[in-house]
Amino acid sequence: MIVLDGKVAAAATKDQLKEEVDAIIRAGRPAPHLAAILVGNNGASETYVASKVKQCAEIGFQSTLIRLDADVSEEHLLEKIESLNNDPSVDGILVQLPLPKQVNEQKVIEAIDPAKDVDGFHPASAGKLVQGLPTFIPATPYGIMLMLEHFNLETKGKHAVVIGRSNIVGRPMSILLSSNNRFGNCTVTICHSHTHNLKEICLQADILVAALGKPEFVKADMVKEGAIVIDVGITRVEDNTAKKGFRIKGDVAYNEVAPKTAAITPVPGGVGLMTIAGLLKNTLQAYKQRRG
């Protein structure tokens, strides 16, 4: 059984990116610039954005963090996005989700210039992904594909089952795994809350991607021997015995599932780290497309 260590795979991606950024800077050109907007003070979002800013610095990116109060108006947030759209020094824009109730998330996503949509959520990006055209891939599915590539896991002809159909993970993941490329060419089944016989379908999976947001939902009796298991879940679960008062749990019951697998991602330390790697690759891509 191989533990798909996100720290190792992400480090390899970041080393490659740093080499490219160093070459850009040596040529006297400005570094790629990622701008992030954080609304409110959600603990998980704070941690995630702080990690993005830190890793931008590690590879030589410029980064800007714009903080807005939780009661910010939708109009003011859209004005901030428009100012970043019009700023020629900014290559990539991300608005950390979730957003407060008074803000329409879809309207915010669509307000971002598709040329700077490094989260890959804009309908223009999603449409290109469906058609197999070059585009910004949502960071988590992109990170998973980078992980499959790093560990050289065979996917061609495999049956992949994706649990979850969100626009952020499930749907784009199914498209990537079924695409005609080196780490695609799977036959893909998407499962969701209305799927009948979920256990039986999961037991057919050579590759199982769990992205439903329910801690330890996938048990050992849902996974066949020798499967590759990708755990996208990351949920804070209260635990008085833990130093911070909580533990991070994935969607897979790791301790009981891992012995049955050929390869599995841990939580934490797996897909989450690769998500940021995917975002950084998108930002460099945006830089190249905009500045040549």
Image (cartoon, grey):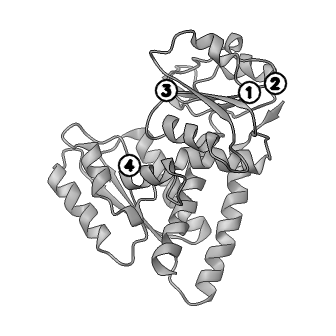
Res. 213 mark = 3
Distance between the Cα atoms at labels 2 and 3? Answer: 24 Å
Q: Amino acid at mark 2?
A: Gly
Residue drawn at the location 66% of the way across and 40% of the way down: 269
Residue 175 or residue 99, whichever sits in front: 175
Q: Which residue is mark 2?
A: 226
Front one among 13 and 107: 107
Residue projecting furthest to the bottom = 28
Q: In 3D space, how far apart are the residues under numbered discs 2 and 1 (Cα atoms)? A: 7 Å
Q: Are marks 2 and 1 in contact (CB under 8 Å)?
A: yes
Residue 13, image x and y in percent? 68, 59
Q: Can you give x and y, in whole percent of width and height, for residue 14 in the image?
A: 66, 61
In this view, the mark in front (2 or 3): 2
Question: The residue tagged with tag 2: helix, strand or loop?
Answer: loop
Residue at 36% x, 78% y is 88
Task: Give SS at disc 4.
Answer: loop
> Which residue has dot 1 on it?
206
Q: In the image, what residue occupies the spot 36% across and 40% down? A: 42
Q: Disc 3 residue type?
A: Gly
Between marks 4 and 2 in the image, the one whose residue lies nearer the viewer:
2
The quadrant holding residue 1 is top right
Q: Earlier in the sequence, mark 4 or mark 3?
A: 4
Residue depth check, mark 2 versus mark 1: number of the one nearer the observer: 1
Tell me which numbered mark, 4 or 2, is placed earlier along the sequence: 4
Q: Is residue 161 left or right of residue 86?
A: right
Helix, strand or loop status at disc 1 = loop
Q: Position of residue 183 (x, y in %)?
A: 71, 46
Q: Is residue 44 above or below residue 51?
A: above
